[in-house]
Image (cartoon, rainbow, N blue to C red):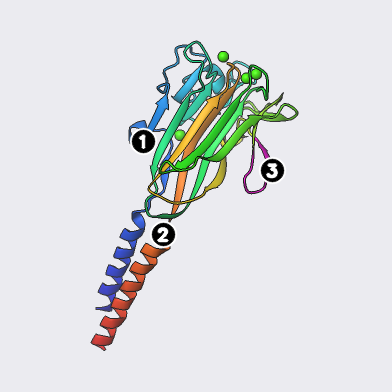
Amino acid sequence: MKNTLLVSAFTSLAITTAANADVLIDFSDMSNVSYTASPALNSFTSNFDAWGVYNFASGAPRMSDQSATGGTVGLISSYDNNPFFGIVDSINNDTTQPPTIEFAIDISGAESISFSIDMGAYGGFEESGSSFDYVKWQYNIDGGTTKTLFDIKPIDEESATYYFDNGSTVDIGSPLSFIDSETGETVILNNGYRNISEQTGGLNTYKTDIEGTGETLYIQLIARVDGSKEVYAFDNLEVTVAPEPGSTSLASLALLLMLTRRQHKTA
Ligand SMILES: [Ca+2]
Ligand SMILES: [Ca+2]
Ligand SMILES: [Ca+2]
Ligand SMILES: [Ca+2]
């Protein structure tokens, strides 16, 4: 009797929490992803421009680590052969406006939400002047106030070290960077990590919290990187939700109460 009740209690709890699911967008199948983009993904005509989903072997040449054949240039490691979202020279013959994409994510029932993303960059960007660059990540919940996730800009006075699959490194000035919302420190983006002996490499992961709750979280990207040697890429966009304490704890309280009452009756 006791065992049956416990099993049913755990089953109900599992169902309650499963309604608040974490969301991972890894670009392996865009048909499962709710988004709107302008211009359409993978619609640029020049092979030196990029806006959309690619892998190591596809897209603009400088998006991928060229150190095996074409010098110490590029972003995505040859050890990382899964699809990512890449952006190169997003101001070109096809468009004068920075492209945008918005992801819609169900957050109903969530109490607290956090956001993490793998991202990296390669190139010498410009903080100001006519070739200026920026990558802006922001969000709103249910169409409310727009807030910043990552305000990414070049810093002319800094440089980044870029790591390559052949073991070499290169320093380039004016990398993309953002201010970490928790520590207040400047984070400089590079082309990620390489572990040559283990043949692994990939983009670094960055996290930030999302304020508020609601039904739908809209995550927006606008990206202006206007040169063919200016690359920005991201992957594994993940929204982690913690369930509302109300729903789960009330349900478990009710079950506990039920359990206690039944036990009293059988005793
Ligand atoms: Ca991926
Ligand atoms: Ca430049
Ligand atoms: Ca530029
Ligand atoms: Ca351009």
Q: CA distance from mark 3 to mark 1?
A: 33 Å
Residue 11 appears at what percent x and percent y?
29, 64
Residue 179 found in image quarter: top right
Pick whichever, 194 or 97, lies toward us. 97
Pick whichever, 84 or 124, lies toward us. 124
Residue 39 appears at what percent x and percent y?
42, 21
Q: Is 187 left, or right, of 20 in this rendering?
A: right
Residue sitting at the far right? 157
Looking at the rendered structure, the secondary structure element under dot 3 is loop
* Disc on the earlier residue, 3 or 2: 3
Q: Does the magenta run of residues contain 226?
A: no
Check disc 3 and report the residue beneath it: 185
Q: Is 257 left, or right, of 44 in this rendering?
A: left
Q: Is residue 202 visible?
A: no
Residue 124 appears at what percent x and percent y?
66, 22
Looking at the rendered structure, the secondary structure element under dot 1 is loop
Looking at the rendered structure, the secondary structure element under dot 2 is loop
The segment highlighted magenta reads: 179-188
Q: Is residue 87 above or below residue 31?
A: above
Q: CA distance from mark 3 to mark 2?
A: 31 Å
Residue 27 appears at what percent x and percent y?
42, 33
